[in-house]
Amino acid sequence: MIMSIIVFGSINIDLVATATHLPTSGETLLGNDFFQIPGGKGANQAVALARLGIPTHIVGRVGTQSFGAELLNHLQTAGVQTGNILLDETVSSGVAIIIVDDAGQNQIVVIPGANGKVNHEDIERLLPLLPTAKALLLQLEIPLSAVVAAAKAGRNANIIVILDPAPAQSNLPAELYPLVDIITPNEVEAGQLVGFKVDSPESAAKAGAVLLQRGVKSAIVKLGAKGVVCATTEETFFVPAFSVNVVDTVAAGDAFNGGLAAALYTGMTLRQAVIWGAAAGALAATKSGAQTSLPDKLTFEAFLKEKSMKYEV
């Protein structure tokens, strides 16, 4: 029986504009370019896993009114199993409006669409997949009640529950933390969760300790070019960032979660998994777009070898 990883989360279409800089309040900019790319944090993480050769299922929703067929086709082309995606006739698919500047930084506005309708019916489609799953990946672009219910289902099935707490929120329910094995905020999201600024390995370690106190088993704080801090009840360690030419950071966090989960799927240690996550995130930042930037297995393995990292294929 083939084990898999399940992603329970959002599926969007990304409408991306590029400009020299990000607009300030009230500012109108002339942009440089526009393109349309399948995205959504759930779909991005599913594609990241599938491209690394991991059997991957996604559970979620798309609308029939717009973009739905395109989104399904792109997931299937990437190798993601889409049989548990509901085609919702009552609403459009989720949409993310993204602006990327010349430095690769971005601003994103997400319209949930069908993602906002995810509920107990989707949990019912999730449950039969859990007995043959190694891990369950969750994000916050679907209703929080559905995230909590999915985490409970994952905990009951005794599989690894990984939560990417994005978009950033400061009011996650206390009951969610003990259901999570690994939480993976970036520095902004970590700051929102713990209530103080997170901008260095030291403050990330402090934030990790707070998240451990709330009940998660491991807290991984992504600091972009400043590296990654991982805190567990046994140790806290730092992994430096891979040096790359940054083009676009839109899906770097999703690539990180894909690399992290892929490593755990193959039986690697958490430290090795963080290295894999950092490598996948760095590679994604070298290309524009969301799913279009996610590395395939050959590219990923070549990158690790080039950087002389020790790993097992």
Image (cartoon, helix red, strand yellow):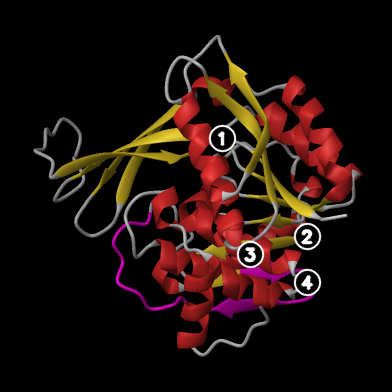
> How far across and down, in percent of the image, does residue 221 sit?
57, 62
Mark 4 highlights which residue?
A: 267
- Magenta includes 134? no
Q: Which label's residue is closer to the chain start, 2 or 3?
A: 2
Question: Is there CB contact under 8 Å for labels 4 and 3?
Answer: no
Q: Is residue 247 visible?
A: yes
Camera-nearest residue between 3 and 214? 3
Q: Quadrant of the N terminus?
A: bottom right
Label 2 Cα crowd, 10 Å radius (few <14 / some 14-19 / many 20+): many
In three-dimensional space, the C-alpha distance between marks 4 and 1, rounded to whole angstroms, equals 27 Å
Where does label 3 land, which residue?
260
**Residue on which disc 1 sits:** 10
In primary-sequence order, the first of circles 4 and 1 is 1
Sooner in the amino-acid sequence: mark 4 or mark 3: 3
- Circle 2 residue: 217
Disc 2 on helix, strand or loop? loop
Span shown in magenta:
230-249
Residue furthest to the left: 30
Seen in the image, is 274 located left or right of residue 107? right
Q: Earlier in the sequence, mark 1 or mark 2?
A: 1
- Near-viewer residue (92 or 199): 92
Q: Position of residue 271 (x, y in %)?
A: 67, 76
Callout 3: 10 Å neighbours few (<14), some, many (20+)? many
Residue 198, relative to residue 14: is it above or below?
below
For image coordinates 60% across by 26% down, the residue present is 61
Q: Quadrant of residue 49?
A: bottom right
Q: Amino acid at mark 3?
A: Leu
Q: Which amino acid type is shown beneath numbered disc 2?
A: Lys
